[in-house]
Image (cartoon, rainbow, N blue to C red):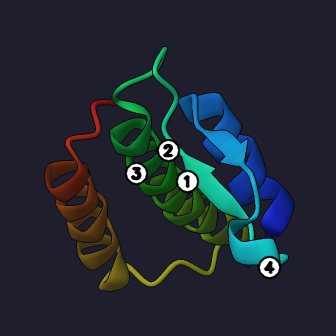
């Protein structure tokens, strides 16, 4: 897990880092009144990151000339499923 990436996406979604609970050092992220859909936006950003990672891997394999044609449909089906499950429009 990349904590900096998670933190960037949470902030980009409009979430705010709240106070520590019960004196613990655990991070608490919460929605912001100004961004009532922050949690949904965060989920969309995570889904988009997954899609971008798959596409980057496909492109990397194409550049190297090592993509296995049989894998391509499955990878694109995974992208489509992520888009559908998380309502991501790109």
The residue positioned 61% from the left and 53% from the top of the image is 29
Inter-mark Cα distance, 3 to 1: 10 Å
- Mark 1 crowd level (few <14, some 14–19, many ≥20, 10 Å Cα): some
SS at mark 3?
helix
Q: How far across and down, in percent of the image, does residue 88 sit? A: 28, 39
Which of label 3 and label 4 is nearer to you? 4
Asked whether the beta carbons under mark 2 and mark 3 sit within 8 Å of each other, the answer is yes
Asked whether the beta carbons under mark 1 and mark 2 sit within 8 Å of each other, the answer is yes
Asked whether the beta carbons under mark 3 and mark 1 sit within 8 Å of each other, the answer is no
Camera-side residue of 57 and 32: 32
SS at mark 1?
helix
Inter-mark Cα distance, 4 to 1: 30 Å
Tell which circle, 2 or 4, labels the residue nearer the N-terminal end: 4
Tell which circle, 3 or 1, labels the residue nearer the N-terminal end: 3
- Residue position marked by numbered label 4 in the rendering: 24
Q: How far across and down, in percent of the image, does residue 65 sit? A: 65, 72
Note whether 23 is above or below 50 in the view shown.
below
Residue 32 horizontal side relative to residue 1, left or right? left
Camera-side residue of 88 and 16: 16
- Residue position marked by numbered label 2 in the rendering: 45
When asked about the image quadrant of residue 6, the answer is bottom right
Could you tell me which quadrant the C terminus lies in?
Answer: top left
Note whether 5 is above or below 68 in the view shown.
above
The residue positioned 36% from the left and 25% from the top of the image is 36
> Given the current orientation, which residue lies at the most extreme top position?
34
- Residue position marked by numbered label 3 in the rendering: 43
- Mark 4 crowd level (few <14, some 14–19, many ≥20, 10 Å Cα): few
The residue positioned 85% from the left and 76% from the top of the image is 25
SS at mark 2?
helix
Which of label 2 and label 4 is nearer to you? 4
């Amino acid at each position: 897990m990349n904590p900096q990436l998670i933190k960037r996406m949470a902030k980009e979604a409009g979430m705010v880092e709240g106070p520590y609970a019960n004196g613990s050092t655990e991070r608490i992220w919460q929605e912001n009144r100004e961004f009532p859909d922050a949690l949904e936006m965060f989920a969309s950003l995570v889904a988009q990151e997954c899609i971008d990672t798959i596409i980057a891997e496909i492109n990397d394999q194409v550049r190297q000339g090592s993509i296995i044609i049989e894998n391509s449909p499955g990878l694109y089906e995974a992208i489509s499923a992520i888009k559908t499950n998380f309502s991501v429009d790109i």
